[in-house]
Amino acid sequence: MLIDDIIYVIVLLLCIGFGEVFRGFKDANTKQWVSTGFGLLVGFVVSGVHILHPIISTVIAAVLITNLSHRTRHIAAFFFSFFYLLFVFRLCDWYGAEVPSTHTNLLQMIITLRIAGLGFEMNSAVESLKEDPNNRTYRAMKNIGFLDVVHFSIGYIGLLTGPYYTYRTYWDCIHNNFGDYIDCRGQTLQKLKKIAVAVVFHLFFNFYYPISYVYTEEFQARSLVYRIFYVYPSFFNFKTRIYAGMMLSECVCQMAGLGAYPTSSEPRSGLGPTDYKKVLEMADNPQKLKSEKMDFETIHNIDIPEVERCFLVRKAMKSWNITVQYWMAAYVYKQFPSKALRTAATFMISAVWHGWAFGYYVTLLSLIFFLPVEDLYVKFYKQSEDNSFTKKGLWALLYFLRFSCMSYLGIGFQLLEYDNTVYYFTNIYAAGHIFVGILYIIGRQMKPPSIVETDKRL
C-alpha cells in the first residue's frame, strides 16, 4: 500500500507541474492532443500494458456514442461502460489474464464516469437544441466526433481518481482558456499547504493506528470497548489519506486551468456554471474577464470543514467526493424510473463502481438502514423548541451518530475482503448496527418532551 501511495503521489505531482506547460498552449487542437498524449503517458506509467483496457473501452464507447441515435446512445454508453468495468476489466483473471494494478482501476473508474455521463450530456443537448436551435449554451455538444470522445475520456486532467467534470467543462478549458484569468499557481500552492497538513496527520495515525493491527492476536486480546473504539482513529487515518488524494487531484485541474469560471456564473461542483449565458458573455469579452472574480468551484471535490463539523450523514456525504456525488445524482438517482428505489439503486451503483469487494457493499448498503434513523431524529430536532435542552441534546446525538456512522461503516472500505470484514464486525458483535436499531425502536415509540408540549399547544 505504501509503495502504491508513493507512486500515486509522484504521478499526481508530475501532472500538477505539467499544468504550467499545458496552459502555455493556446491552440485548441494542440491542447487536445497534448492533454490526450500526456494522459496516455500517465496511463502507461501507472498501468504498463494494462493501458489497453482504458483505450479499448474508450474506442468502443466512442463508436457507440457517435453512431447511435440520441434516444439510445446514453443508455448504451452507460451500460457498456459499467459492463466493461465490472465484467471485462475487474474479472479478467477469470479469462486467464493478469489482474490490472490498483492505479489502472482508478483510471478505468473515472473513464467509466466520463463515458456514461457524456451520453446523457449529449442527449440533453439534443433535446434543448430541438426547442432552440440557436441555443449557444450547448454549442460544445453540437459536433462531437469520435476523436472528441477519445480526447475527453483519456485527457490527463483528473485521469487519476477525478474529479469528475462534464464535457462542457472540458471544452471550455480547451477553447476558452479561462485559466488565464485566475491565479492557478497561487491557488494550487495554498492547497498544497493543506495537503501537507493532511499528510502529516495521516502518517501519524497510520503509525499508531494502522488498519493492519486488527488482524493481529494482540488486537483480539483487547477489550470489546477498545476494539469498537478502534474504528475512530483508523477512519481518521483513512480519511486524511483521502483528503490528500482528492486535493491533489483538484490541484491537477487548477494548474491546467480546467474548471475556472466567473463566480457570477454560479458554478457548482461537477456540473459547472448554472448560468452559462454569463460564461458565453465573458468568453466574447476577454477584457471584462480581467476584472471578473473567478473560482474553481466546478472541480471542488471535497469540503473538509463541512465534513468535519456537520452533524448529519447526508450532509457529510454531499461534501465528500462532491463531483462524483453530482454524477450519481444526475445520472442515476434522477434517471431511475422507480422513485421508491432511487436511493437503493444509487447506493448499489456507487458500490459496484467502487468494486466487487464485500466491504464496499457493507458500507454503502448499510447506509440505506442508517439514514432512516437519522431522518427520524432530524424530524424531532426540527420540531423541538429553539435553544431548548431537547434540541441541543438531539444535535449532540445526531453529531455523534454522523461521526460514529462514518467511522464504523468506513471500516468496510479499509478491510474490503469478505473474510476480513465479516471477521471484524463479528468480533465487535455488529455493535453499530445494533445501536442504530435500538435508536430506531426508541424513536418510533416516543417523542422528546419539548415536541409533546409543542403538539399540545397546537
Image (cartoon, rainbow, N blue to C red):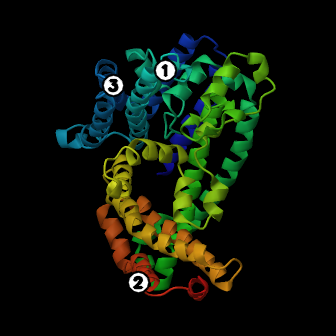
Extreme front residue here?
458
Q: Quadrant of residue 98?
A: top left
Which residue in the structure is indicated by mark 1? 132
Distance from Cα at disc 2 to Cα at disc 1: 54 Å
Camera-side residue of 389 and 16 = 389
Residue type for callout 2: Ile
Secondary element at image label 2: helix
Q: Is residue 223 visible?
A: no
Instruction: Please say if 431 is above or below 409.
Output: below
Instruction: Please say if 306 is above or below 445.
Output: above
Secondary element at image label 1: loop
The x, y position of residue 390, in whole percent, is: 63, 84
- Mark 2 or mark 1: name the one nearer the start of the chain: 1
Distance from Cα at disc 2 to Cα at disc 3: 49 Å
Asked if the residue under mark 1 is in contact with the one under mark 3, i.e. CB atoms within 8 Å, the reply is no
- Mark 2 or mark 3: name the one nearer the start of the chain: 3
User: Quick one: quadrant of the C terminus?
Assistant: bottom right
Which residue in the structure is indicated by mark 2? 441
Camera-side residue of 407 and 67 = 67
Which residue in the structure is indicated by mark 3? 70
Residue type for callout 3: His
**120 left or right, relative to 399:** left
Secondary element at image label 3: loop
Camera-side residue of 224 and 380 = 380
The x, y position of residue 86, in whole percent, is: 28, 43
Asked if the residue under mark 1 is in contact with the one under mark 2, i.e. CB atoms within 8 Å, the reply is no
Residue drawn at point x = 57 percent, y = 87 percent: 456
Q: Residues within 10 Å of mark 3 (few under 14, many from 20)?
A: some
Query: Which mark is nearer the camera, 2 or 1?
Result: 1
Q: Is residue 412 visible?
A: yes
